[in-house]
Structure formats: C-alpha cells, structure tokens
Amino acid sequence: MIKIVGVVGAGTMGHGIAQVFAQAGFDVRLVDISRPMLDRAETQIRASLAKFVEKGKLSVSDRDSALGRLRMSTALEDLVDADYIVEAIVENADAKRDLFKRLDGMTAPETILASNTSSISITLIGAATSRPDRVLGMHFMNPVPLMTLVELIRGQATSDATMGAATDLCRSLGKNGVEAADYPGFISNRILLPMLNEAFYAVMEGVGTPEAIDAVMKGGMNHPMGPLALADFIGLDICLAILNVLHEGLGDPKYRPCPLLKRMVAAGYLGRKSGRGFYEYA
C-alpha cells in the first residue's frame, strides 16, 4: 500500500506534483539539492492552496492538513522508506539515469520509481536500475494542480502491476491516467512540439508577429492559449530539449529545432521563468 510519496526536484513541476499528492492524503517528501528552491516551492504551494481556499474548492482545515503532510529536504536519503517516488529534475537522460541508479540502491525493492520526463525513454531510464519492471513514466501536465491528465508511459520491462498501481494513484489524485508507448515525446509532445516548432519558424520567417500567430490559433482554432504564449509558459529551454529528443530519437528532419529557438535559448530568453521569451514578463 502506498502511503509515503517522494518527489525529487522542487521546480515548477516538482512542487505541483508534491502539492497534489499532499492534498490527496499522502505523506510527501519533496527533495531538492537547493534549499532556496525548496523555500520557493513552499511559498508557491502555499499560494496555490490559498487560491483553492479563496475559490471555495478547499477548506482551511484541508489546506492545513495538506501542508502538514508535506516535508522539505535537501537529503535524498530521506526517501529511503518511500513507497513511490516521482522524479522531476532537469530533462537530461544522464542526470535521470544517475538519479534512478541512486534511488535503486537506497530504497526497498518493491518501491516504484516514476519519471515525470516529457520525452526521454523510460526503457533507458529503467535500465539504470535493478528493477526496470517497477519503473514507469508519470508525465503530469502544467499546472499540475489544475490539469487532470497524466500520461503514463510503459517502458519495455514495466510490469502490468506497476502500470496498475500508477493508474490507481491517478484516480486517488482525481486525475485521468492515459497510457502511452515508450516512443520519443510519447503522445503529448510528439504532437504538440511540432506545432510549436512551426510557430517558431513562422516568427523567424516573418509570416506573422507572435501576437498575430497566437491570435489566429486562439480565434481560428479555438486554442485556449496561443502556441508562442504556451511555449513561453512551458519554457523555451524545455521545448528545445524535447525537440532535440524527437529529432535524435526519430531521425526525421521535420523535428529539427527552429534556429530562432536555439538562439533565444542561447541568449537566456527562456520565457516566463526568465522574464523574456516571445513576450516580455514583468
């Protein structure tokens, strides 16, 4: 039975994942090597829960209970007795494999290890452990507390029992787990990123301004957010990392990252998190 959930990485996705597990009644341990990141994560979680209270979707007592179930730590060893761990660190295969190897060596053999990766092979990550049958992808959508979809990725060795446990967890969180095969980008980013990349090319080639391109997709295609505003929200560095995985993993030139995107990332224009992307943010 899953009672203690570990989350590694206190960035935008990590703290959102920690929040939803804590709200659902699990004891949560959020681990990050950076204490300032943990402090920022706690502030953001408190602000998010306060909004739920303000909108009448969460009682004050439930908010306090959720916060009481959440622990912050800079020590990975604090996850030694976790029943289920979700990794949400940088989108880099080597970094994820190194982390999974460490987690594999310190946790009980039955502990399930999940990755929030948005594009990297679960089979590759699982092969760094002695329990690939207990490794899967659990790709949450941003913002995690609001988005109901979770993409569940089955690696080559992932067992039916592991997929079933993850599906049950999604239900406990009030989310819909949808299974995807272990191909680069899975379902969501295999379809989304080429569209975003085409929008980057349209800006580079002067087809339209960012405002015009987003207006067309919102007003003409009924998208809630334009592709360039969405890319800024995701993070242009994340978009580039996913496109690189698609391009290298599938070998098709249609996934080649737009040169403009590469230049913007190199310049530090990463979107909302850096204050500037295709738009500027205060």
Image: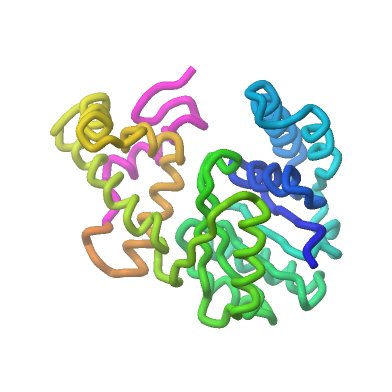
Q: Give the residue drawn at x 81%, y 62%.
A: 82
Q: Give the residue drawn at x 73%, y 47%.
A: 24
Give the residue furthest to the top: 282
Q: Is residue 281 above or below residue 33?
A: above
225 inside magenta stretch:
no
Percent of width and height locating residue 70: 81, 43
Q: Give the residue drawn at x 37%, y 32%.
A: 229
Q: Give the residue drawn at x 77%, y 39%.
A: 35
Number of dots carrying numbers:
0
- Name the quadrant containing residue 37: top right
Percent of width and height locating residue 226: 31, 33
Percent of width and height locating residue 77: 84, 60
Q: Is residue 216 left or right of residue 121?
A: left
Q: Is residue 140 left or right of residue 101?
A: left
Q: Is residue 223 above or below residue 81?
A: above
Colour logic:
rainbow
Q: Which part of the image, by quadrant, shows the N terminus?
A: bottom right
Q: Nearer the viewer, residue 21 or 129?
A: 21
Percent of width and height locating residue 89: 61, 53
- Name the quadrant containing residue 108: bottom right
Which residue range is magenta in the image?
256-282
Q: Nearer the viewer, residue 56 or 214?
A: 56
Q: Is residue 172 above or below residue 60?
A: below
